[in-house]
Amino acid sequence: MAAAVLAVVTGCTVQAPEGDGKRRSPVHIEIPDGTPSPARTPDGDGDGGGGPGTAPAPPGDDRPRAAPRVLWSRGDTGHDVRELQARLRQVAWLFDGPTGTYDGPTEKAVSGFQGKRGLPRTGRTDTVTWQRLLGMTHEPGKWDLYLMGGQPADPPDPRCATGRVLCVDKTSRTLRWMIDGRTVSTMAVRFGSQYTPTREGVFSVYWKSRDHVSTLYDSPMPYAMFFSGGQAVHYSADFAARGYAGASHGCVNVRDEAAIAGLYAQVRNGDKVVVSR
């Protein structure tokens, strides 16, 4: 028992953040200098003018132009909105998300993107805005789209079919809390890096520590449920802030504090933990 407690006391926590670690606005802000910039043709640097659907009308052509069709606007949800947000992140107009919900920050980011390129600042994504953004970005990968969680869970490992189980899936990066084969709750999780991998196999919760602090890394590990030496399922403020841009030192991180608080209240010492790939 003394050896187990010693392993737990060391604990695990998140890898040190990259960059300067400074907090920033969730939306890129352009501060005008009062001098309009001359229009430029697209040059691939993300600041060119023009783009699909924005060519000037021929001289003397005064016919009214139909407004471009709006694809998405505030309040819309879904995979397409998630892709829009991921592409806005690529060109540094949006720093939070993707969330899959067209919210205030998304509207502000679209408006800023439009204004920078001489398009009407509506904040709504129309066909012209979308084509301009498509031309400046690449197709997002799965973990670009789900950087902050929200991804669907894969079917549970067969070893999770009976009893009370924390069913952790590394492929879908999810944790299911299951009782007798029924999924009670599901949440996004992240794992250790390639240098400090989260162990795979069948374990059991052997110690819970509500306000645990890692003595090895001197960082908090709230709602810690230890299952293998110093590795535990616990809340991570870093995961909540940076999503999958970071990693743990082997623990299973949860970013939803309310969800893990509820989970911590239900899990008992002795409950099974299955970590599968």
Image (cartoon, rainbow, N blue to C red):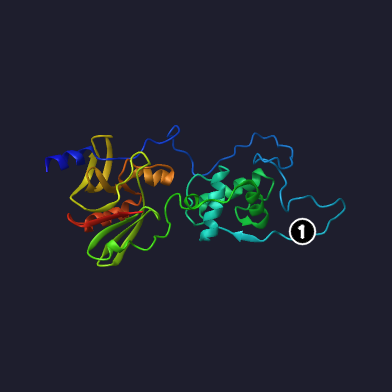
Where in the figure is residue 155, as x and y percent of width and height? 37, 63
Q: Left or right: where does residue 93 sit relative to residue 132?
A: left
Q: Quadrant of the C terminus?
A: bottom left
**162 w.r.t. 108: above or below:** below
Counting the numbered discs, the total is 1
Q: Left or right: where does residue 242 sit relative to residue 197?
A: right
Looking at the image, which residue sits at the far left? 1
Where in the figure is residue 205, as x and y percent of width and height? 20, 52
Q: Secondary structure at mark 1?
A: loop
Q: Quadrant of the N terminus?
A: top left
Where in the figure is residue 68, as x and y percent of width and height? 69, 59
Q: Left or right: where does residue 34 sit relative to residue 179?
A: right
Q: Left or right: where does residue 126 sit relative to residue 266?
A: right
Where in the figure is residue 29, as x and y percent of width and height? 56, 40
- Residue at the location (60% across, 52% down)? 123
- Quickly name the residue at label 1: 65
Callout 1 environment at 10 Å: few (<14), some (14 to 19), or many (20+)? few
- Residue at the location (67% across, 35% down)? 34
Is 98 or 180 nearer to us in this picture? 180
- Residue at the location (26% across, 47% down)? 232
Looking at the image, which residue sits at the far right? 60
Is 232 or 126 nearer to us in this picture? 232
